[in-house]
Image: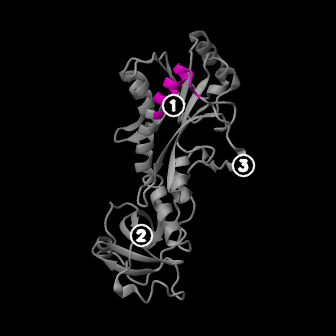
Amino acid sequence: MGTPDFAVPSLKALFENNYEIIGVVTKTDSTRRGSRGLKEVPPPVKEYAVAHNIPVFQPEKLSKDTELISKIAQMAPDLIVTCAYGQILPKSLLDIPKYGTINVHGSLLPKYRGAAPIHWAIINGETKTGITTMFTEVGLDTGDMLLKAEIDIPIDMTAGELHDRLSLLGAETLIKTLKELENGTLKPERQDESQATYAPKIEKSTGIIDWSQTTLQIHNRIRGTTPWPGAYTDMCGKRTKICCSKIKGYPDSLANVVNDTQICPGTILYISADGMWVKTTDGAIFINMIQPECCKSMTPLQYACGHELRVGMKLTGCKKD
């Protein structure tokens, strides 16, 4: 059971390791506007399943689809595997498989339970994260932990880059978990509730930049919302996406202004060929690329050539949608 790109490597690993996959449960197709009007777009998991002749089921809400749950019971799976399915599974389903239900989760539980562990790990400045496989129970990522695999989060890694690394690590960890299950060597471990944290769903408003935060907090917000929903600010009266930022040493010409408390956070301090420096509450952050609404990505200097972007201008937070 799974839906987005993150789940595809786990499904692929099951298929390529010759596990018998009797069916895939995924979300319904989405509707998107294309050049020729509205079109139905299947979830990535469905695309892989169809390409490999695996039966696909797409309930609107699985917990209320008693007919499908009864059908799954008749299919009598030994094990259910979930990865980024996005719905709480009912007890009536969890009681079906002989060996239980194993979930692949993109964090080191019990930290970052919930929908968006990858984004929030970066936004919160974590330097490590990983994959946890766990037995699923009724609840939000509360089941007994099985195996963990840890990786570092480099200071400039984006949520998109971390997503791709963890999706592959998740597939590897899943297969290791199943091998130990087969060998009888799995040792489930209860989660420490006192250490549990929650990673809520990411909204568009999550990307709004608060320039009164520290340089590191703003940098983490930008990379933690890249590529979606993006980090945004108001610039020249336009909602502008900040595509990329860096934390690095200041040019000599900024030595007297980066720590000037009289300069408001969000003020543009310097514009060069490769980016611009913007004041933060504890210094300044370097912005490489921007994308004003209705424009393509470009450097700040490229945008300044045809617009009133200048040193001394103050960037502000956008209104929530």
| Residue at 47% over, 29% down | 176
Along the line of sight, which residue is nearer the eye, 297 or 202? Answer: 202
Q: Can I make out residue 302 in this image?
A: yes
Question: Which residue is the site of mark 3?
Answer: 194
Left or right, 198 with reference to 262: right
- Stretch of the chain drawn in magenta: 173-186
The answer to whether residue 105 is magenta is no
Quarter assignment of residue 269:
bottom left
Q: What residue sits right under mark 1 in the picture?
A: 2
Which label lies toward us, 3 or 2? 3
Under circle 2, the secondary element is loop
Q: Which residue corresponds to mark 2?
A: 247
Q: Is residue 289 above or below residue 121?
A: below
Mark 1: few/some/many CA within 10 Å (<14, 14-19, 20+): many
x and y percentages locating residue 228 in the rendered image: 46, 52
Most frequent secondary structure within the magenta stretch:
helix
Q: Residue furthest top?
A: 74
Within-10-Å neighbours for mark 2: few <14, some 14–19, many 20+: some
Front in this rendered view, residue 157 or 270: 157
N-terminal of the pair, mark 1 or mark 2, is: 1
In the picture, measured across the screen, residue 304 lies left or right of residue 258, that is left
Q: Looking at numbered disc 2 in the image, what kind of residue is underneath it?
A: Ile
Which dot, 1 or 2, sits closer to the camera?
Answer: 2
Which quarter of the picture shows residue 274? Answer: bottom left
- Nearer-the-camera pick, 117 or 60: 117
The image shows residue 79 at horizontal and vertical percentages of 56, 20
**Residue 176 among magenta residues:** yes
Q: Amino acid at mark 1?
A: Gly
Task: Give how far across and how far down residue 301 sits, in percent.
Answer: 30, 74
